[in-house]
Image: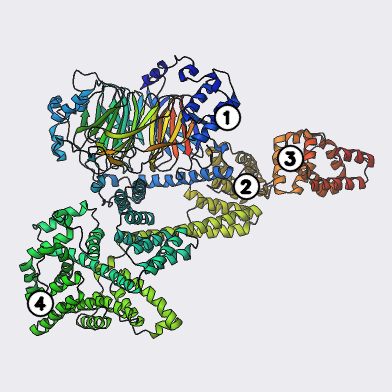
Amino acid sequence: MSTPLSKPQIISHIQKRLNYTVFDSKWIPCSAKFVCVGNFARGTGVMQIYEVQQGEAQLIKEVEKPKPIKCATFGAASLQQRHIATGDFDGNLNIWNLEVPEVPVYSVKAHKEIVNSIDGVGGLGIGDGAPEIVTGSRDGTVKVWDHRQRDSPVVNMEPVEGETKRDCWTVAFGHAYNDQDRCVCAGYDNGDIKLFDLRNMSLRWETNIKNGVCCVEFDRKDINMNKLVATSLEGKFHIFDMRTQHPTKGFASVSEKAHKSTIWQVRHLPQNREIFMTAGGAGNLHLWKYEYPAKRSKKDSDGVDVGVAGTVNLLQNVTVSTQPIASLDWNPDKQGLLLCSGFDQTVRVHIVTKLNLV
Amino acid sequence: MMDVFENCSTTADHRESLSKSLDVPVECLDYGYIEKCKDVKYLEKILKVLRSGEEGYYPHLIEFCESHLEKLNPKSRVLRKANPVATSASLGKDEWNQIVDELMTWQEETKNTEMSLQQQSTHDLMKEIPSIRGSTSSISLSKTSNAKEKGNSSKRALPRDYQEWDKFDVEKECERVDGDVLQSDHPPAVKIKGHAKIKTEVDVSLLTQQERLLLANREKDKGNEAFRAIDYEEAVAYYSRSLCFSPTVAAYNNRAQAEIKLDQWHNAMTDCQSVLDLEPCNVKALLRRATVHKHMGQLHLATDDLREVLMEEPQNAVAIALLSEIETLEENQPEQQRRGKRILIQEEEEENDDSNNNMQAQAFLAEPSQPVGGEESSAAPGERGDMGNAQKKPHSRGDRGPHGDASSSHAGQWRSKGASSDKYKVTPHESKEKVSNGTSKRDSTASSQTDQSGSGKTTQAGETVNLDAPCGALPPPLARLKNEGNLLFKNGQFADALEKYSQAIQGYTDSGIDSPQDLCVLYSNRAACSLKNGSSHDCIQDATTALELQPFSLKPLLRRAMAYESLERYRKAYVDYKTVLQIDTSVQAAHDSVNRISRLLVEQDGPEWREKLSEIPLVPLSAQQHRREEQPSAEVLQARAEKAARDAERKAEIRFSALKQEGNEFVKKGQHQEAVGKYSECLKLKPEDCAIYTNRALCYLKLEKFTEAKLDCDAALKLEPTNKKAFYRRALAFKGLKDYLACSTDLQEVLQQDPNVQEAEKELEEVTVLLRESLANDSRGKPRKTVPITEVEDDDEEPVAVPNSAGSCRGQDTTINFHPTCSVEFGQALNAACVTGNTAACSNLLASTAPEMLPQYLSTQLDGHTLSFIVQALDSHLLEKDTNLVYQHLNHLHTADRFSIALMLMEKDKRRHMTHLFEHLSSVESTEFTKNDVQNLANKYK
């Protein structure tokens, strides 16, 4: 506050009103284009491609789909193809070629109910190993898909019969630093966070943060897992240091009450994993930086290693809308270019300056 | 997720008075109290109450409270305020322009990247993708029996309605595929040491250039992050990956820094060297190399590097600090020791060679089935797989004396050390065989190297040393003597070692074997002993003998050079070092010594020092060690080539844009002929730039060289078949050539592309008329308009097409519509004249305008500048022609809407024009007005 000029600034660059509810928006890697997905008031789905040109977002393509599209990812696509994977209200997982978006290149009925969240790894040069997509759904299951296998998931994480199914709100890949190791983290409406180890096919860790988990993300997918941020319904977020796992205490964490309303999204800056942005239910964006402690692990009384969490600093906060910001995406190529869309039917491109100075 | 929303709203408001719930009495809401209060938490509460407005609204008190709280705890959460999002207006203009420019260039770049990515999309099919995970066709929910998972779920204390989550249904196949048995027990704590498993080698063969750069950058980012998180080993791993994708200066530099942090001096040195190969004066690399030198005890070299840094950047604080540190170190160090140290470096180099060759030898000797080889390769990646590292470690131990070897029972720790001693045990008969039939050079070098390295390893290996290990063609007793000598040497008993070697040499000559290589090694080793003992003369003698036996062998040469140097016979030392460098350019110590000595020689002998040197022998190619050729590694070479290409490209680019800029300048000034020259030069550099063609076409049009203009437009259209400007200009060219048909076709094309181009429309109308006329009155010949060009270029059109620099030049002397029919047209015409300062045009315009209409036409456009311009025009041109009209104009002008304001805004020196005008006007006799009228009018203009 004292030296506003040295702080990163969040600058509004482009605002584009849309005539539908936008649920997710993603930059197309290696381009100045982005994709918006959502649903029309008449109950159909829509996918639009925009290009940033001279401070304007110009619509390049629009396709209508039978079902509203909830989420999208490029994470499992190759840099050359850049196929987008989407999850819709009907539980379908589709992969589209954006050049010919009329017919999907891959389609599967993945879940019985809406696909809430999707993430990909192994594409775009991020993460060694096979390209895989993970989907989390209201039907309580989390499934991992490989586009080379048509009808069934390669891994399925579901509750046993007879148990109440919890709504899975968010999924994220991580720990994909060689071709065997890989983890999936899932967050549920009851506050559960579960970490599945895909190499050992086991539940590696779980915890409960007492409120619905709206979003989880690893600071980087393709490194030995380092940090995990989980945001919650009541406006808090938790950062877990994933380097040291204590047999009983699990991972050390720090939490911060930041927003007065739900934190819908968290996204780490692709160029610097210690910086991340959270988006809140009141239309505000907060930019944070994680500071490591002097030593990241210590011995507890039994001589077992236990992690030490660091601290988190607020770098900047702005209000961009009165409605929740539902999606957030940093441009993977241009540092500081941020795409966000909210329930006010607007997609915005922001520029965040001085990120290299913090 | 939609119901998240509802949840939020239901949990809301039912709270009582804030002040009660926070326990803040009203008395506390007071300047005095707040000022004294030091309790941050309480202050926060006070602030909350104040802000709630329950006790009334006191903006100043709130402000005061905030500022006080900020003093106590600037990071207090209560102080966080949601700011409105910044816009372009909230930044300085320069800053914003910079951001926008960056964005633009990025957009251009990504477009290109995207294009090239799309072009290469076929590559994708060939790429290997890791296979699919095992399929889940048979999901068994019965895995509940898994002991671990049960244990987990029963331990949960939290009300957990989701225990089933901890079991996870995957069939056994998956586990088999992954080749990992499910661990039944957790290790006590999982300290994740992942970098051991990060692959540092990546297959880049199938990646395109774009992808490589992208990935290299990303891996470097990861390295930087790991570095900042103080995880240097991981950082090194990621930098190595980045270098695999594309070798860059930054990655080398950063890896060097990380290696310095890890005390991996040798690797750091190599990396600095790579940077300096790419960029000879990289300050960071020099600084880092200086640090490495300092830690390796090579203070001289460190000083050299730092001096170089200071030459580049005289203010570099780090370098200055380091230099002074080293100087104090140097003072504390006795001269003798420095000498010794310098020799040490040399030994390092040797050791380096040894272990390299050792590896070679091992690969050669070890049968695949032998545990040695297998172990070596499996251990290597685990130890970060750096050859350099493996070489370095045993050596530095050798220096400091054996320590930390108690743990030597771990096979993995042995690496080359253990491996080589093993080799001695396993291979005797094998290598003998080779000796018996082996005259191949490789054999002998391998064995001669092994014995040296063996000497190093045996010290640590202790009892396991087999002193009877064979050495080349030496008979066992001699070999034993030699090995003993090596051992003693390593232990620092140089005199004893020297004796052993002497015995071996004696025995050798007695036995009469003919194996000059071995004898050479013996002499060379004895030379090393002598050197260590300080008897440089003996060293030189031995080394010379060795060199007679084996001309151009590296080690004896180096040793002799060092001996010469210690005797201060610098010229000879210089010659020897130079010879060494011919054999192997990578001997860093030789490089450094050459530098040092040449400086000394310059001091000693003056500038002609080279003439006093004896001739440096030419090393035959066969003696130059072949592996040196790879020394600037393929990576470095590749990077160099890329860099050179990029440089050339950039230079061309810069020259191109400079030329273009100059050309545009000339156009602005109206010097079309010169502009044509510049543009032509541009096209030599970049024949495929469409904008240049259209620009040149414009110049030709102005010069009325219509044929050339047409040709240029044709060229532009070949490059960009839809270029509007090219069409338009070609139309003008056709018009000039009187080919009205082609002209109208082109104009129609323009209008088809963009129906809003007014000038094209106007032009088209005109041309159609002309076309008709020319068809009808073919016999009459001349159409009325002969030089339509001046009328053609309209005000709106940017005369010079500069595709990305937004309007760096605009509106030059465009022609003016002298017959305005409405205020817009008049305004445009006036503006055009005004911008170019063309008073004649303005007077023409005024002459054709009815004075009564003037105020109406001017309406809102009148400002100080225009007013003075009009006055100037009236004064300088119109006054001579038609004084009455001037009077009329002036008479009406002052009734224009904004006249009084414009008058007020007029600058002083411009007012002088005004008085001039009236003076002139009053001096003219006229029937229309009298002097009094003029005087009255002049008063209105004051």
Please report, as a chain letter, where disc 2 is located: B
Determine if marks 3 and 4 fall on one subunit: yes
Judged from the image, the secondary structure of the residue bearing numbered disc 2 is: loop
Please tell me which of labels 4 and 1 falls first in the chain. 1
Q: Which residue is mark 4?
A: B478
The front one of B921 and A280 is A280
The front one of A275 and B301 is B301
Tell me, for residue B608, which label it has, or none. none
Q: Amino acid at mark 1?
A: Phe
Q: Which residue is mark 3?
A: B819
Determine if marks 4 and 1 fall on one subunit: yes
Question: In this picture, is B817 found above or below A96?
Answer: below
The front one of B677 and A285 is A285
Question: In this picture, is B35 found above or below B582?
Answer: above
Q: Amino acid at mark 3?
A: His
Q: Quadrant of residue B818?
A: top right
Question: In this picture, is B294 found above or below A89?
Answer: below
Name the image colouring.
rainbow
Please tell me which of labels 3 and 1 falls first in the chain. 1
